Amino acid sequence: MIKTVEGDFSVGSAKLALIASRFNWAIVDGLVNGAIDTLRRHAIPEAHITLVKVPGAIELPLAAKRIAERGEVDGIIALGAVIKGATSHFDYVAGECAAGLAKVSQEYILPVSFGVLTTENLEQAIERSGTKAGNKGIDAAMSALEMISLLRNL
C-alpha cells in the first residue's frame, strides 16, 4: 500500500506574513482583502497576521528573505500585480520576483505562496483580483495554509 502525505487547511495558531506590493495597489488591495478574509475563515487570529507593504513586485523577495531570516512566521503570502506593458520590463520584474520568492522558500524551508498576478493587461488583473476570474489572493492564502500543514506532516 502506498503511503500518501498531504496537507489540509487546519494549521492551528500559525503565524503568517502577507507581503503586498503598493504598485498597482487598486488591484493588489483586492488580493490582500481576499487573503486576509481567507485566513480569518480558517481561524487564524488577526494578531497572527502581519501585513508588510513594499514599493513593487521586485522588492517582494527581499522582504520575504528578511521575514524568513527572523524565523517568526510559519508562512509568507506574497501579493502583487505585474501588468505587461509595451517594453520587456514586465519579463524581468515577473521573472525575478518569482525566482526570488522560490529561492527564499527553498533556502528557509518555509512556504512562500506566490500570489503575484502576471497579466497581459489591466482587464485580466481586475478579473483575477476579485471579479469574474476569482481572487488569486484567496488562492495564495489557501496554498500557504496547505503547505504549512504539509510540511508539518512530512
Image (cartoon, rainbow, N blue to C red):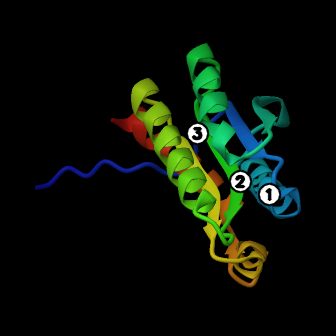
Q: Residue shown at 25%/52% (left/top)?
A: 4
Residue 148 in view: no
Spatial CA distance of label 2 from label 3 is 24 Å
Q: Residue shown at 41%/26% (left/top)?
A: 107
Judging from the image, what secondary structure is the residue with disc 2 in?
strand
Q: Considering only order in the chain, which callout, 1 or 3, is on the residue closer to the N terminus?
A: 3
Judging from the image, what secondary structure is the residue with disc 3 in?
loop
Which amino acid lies under the numbered mark 1 shown in the image of this protein? Answer: Val
Residue 62 in view: yes
Count neighbours of disc 2 (C-alpha within 10 A) and say few if under 14, some if 14 to 19, many if 20 or more.
many
Q: Residue shown at 58%/26% (left/top)?
A: 65
Q: Considering only order in the chain, which callout, 1 or 2, is on the residue closer to the N terminus?
A: 1
Q: Nearer the viewer, mark 2 or mark 3?
A: 2
User: Is 33 positioned to the left or the right of 107 in the image?
Assistant: right
Which residue of the protein is positioned furthest toward the bottom in this rendering? 132
User: Is 153 positioned to the left or the right of 28 in the image?
Assistant: left
Circle 1 is placed at which residue position? Answer: 28
